[in-house]
Image (cartoon, grey):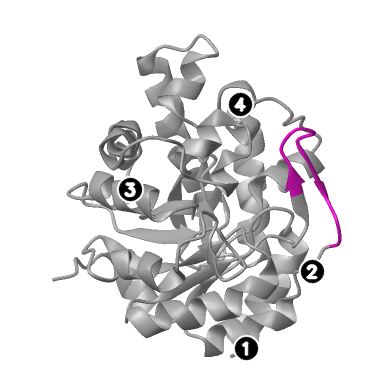
Amino acid sequence: MQHTSPFADALAAGALVLDGGLSNQLQDQGHDLSDALWSARLLADTPQAVTTAHRAYYEAGADVAITASYQATFEGFARRGLDREAAAGLLRRSVALARAAAEETADGRRRWVAASAGPYGAMLADGSEYRGRYGLSVAELVRFHRPRLETLAEAGPDVFALETVPDTDEAEALLTAVAGLGVPAWLTYNVAGGTTRAGQPLADAFALAASADEVAAVGVNCCAPGEAAEALRVAASVTSKPLVVYPNSGELWDAERRAWYGPALFAPAQVTGWQRAGARLIGGCCRVGPTAVRSVAARVRGA
């Protein structure tokens, strides 16, 4: 039996608008994100900048902000000399900063906070989240993810964003790690060419989440916009759960140069097709900014 929560109830009542890319908004605010911790570095160095970025998306019409914890891990912070207590404090801070931005956006709308948990490959900061298959067992991946999820849960997010998942092994690990924490989750795969990034059939991948009590929604993120509609169609064929979609701009990531290249393909007009495919959580990922989110919100609410 699926657990109920205020967030799941809101999702049942109507579509919600997600934010866009946090890193590009922080860069537009003048911050250098070139090191391995990416936007997570600012949790320690310049936390107010994170709140400002979240507020920009809330003010653009987003109902949900995704925290700056995608690349925040105990292992990654340890490489920067932070002990577990300090790292746990920064993980909890990521939720508090998004919550502060929600409270500062006083326009009468309910705002939600999604605690991001990126894949193991995000911690490696070498682009392997776009490949998966790290040579670790599911049990080893559970041991990596569970402490971070426990710590994030302590901060009281409305939902977990288990995002940019490249393969079914990591999905299985995340679904195990999130069980029993009392926080609903959405699970989103990074897909390419009609499969997971590791080349597995999407029907098999989405079916893993179909029976998971904690999963409030399932779908895709950080994929090319053109991949989204077909992936949602496949998801709808194997689960009745609400669907979630937040593609990137369509540009490509060069892990060596830590830079994006190629044309931007994200267009708010695509929202209509995603809604027809069953999407109830709709937004953007990397390189999709507040202007695009404002247009997405107009289309979602207009529908």
Q: Earlier in the sequence, mark 3 or mark 4?
A: 4
Disc 3 from disc 4: Cα separation: 24 Å
Quick check: can you spot residue 217?
A: no
Pointer 1: what residue?
302
The residue carrying mark 4 is 41
Q: Position of residue 167 (x, y in %)?
A: 44, 53
In space, the residues marked 4 and 1 are separated at their CA atoms by 37 Å
Residue appearing at x 45%, y 29% in the figure: 73
Asked if marks 2 and 3 touch (Cβ < 8 Å), the reply is no
Q: CA distance from mark 1 to mark 3?
A: 35 Å
Task: Determine the image quadrant of residue 85.
Answer: top left
Residue 101: percent from left, percent from top: 55, 48
Q: Are marks 1 and 2 in contact (CB under 8 Å)?
A: no
> In the rendered structure, which amino acid carries the disc numbered 4?
Arg
Q: Which residues are magenta?
A: 253-263
User: In this rendering, which labeled residue sits more in front, label 1 or label 3?
Assistant: 3
Q: Amino acid at mark 1?
A: Gly
- Specify whether residue 258 is in view: yes
Q: Nearer the viewer, mark 1 or mark 2?
A: 2
Q: Which residue is mark 2?
A: 265
| Mark 3 lies on residue | 174
Q: Which of pointers 2 and 4 indicates the residue nearer the eye?
A: 2
Mark earlier in primary sequence (1, 2): 2
Indicate yes or no whether the magenta region holds residue 299: no
Binning the other alpha carbons within 10 Å of mark 2 as few (below 14), some (14 to 19) or many (20 upward) gives: some
Judging depth in this view, the residue of 291 and 261 nearest the camera is 261
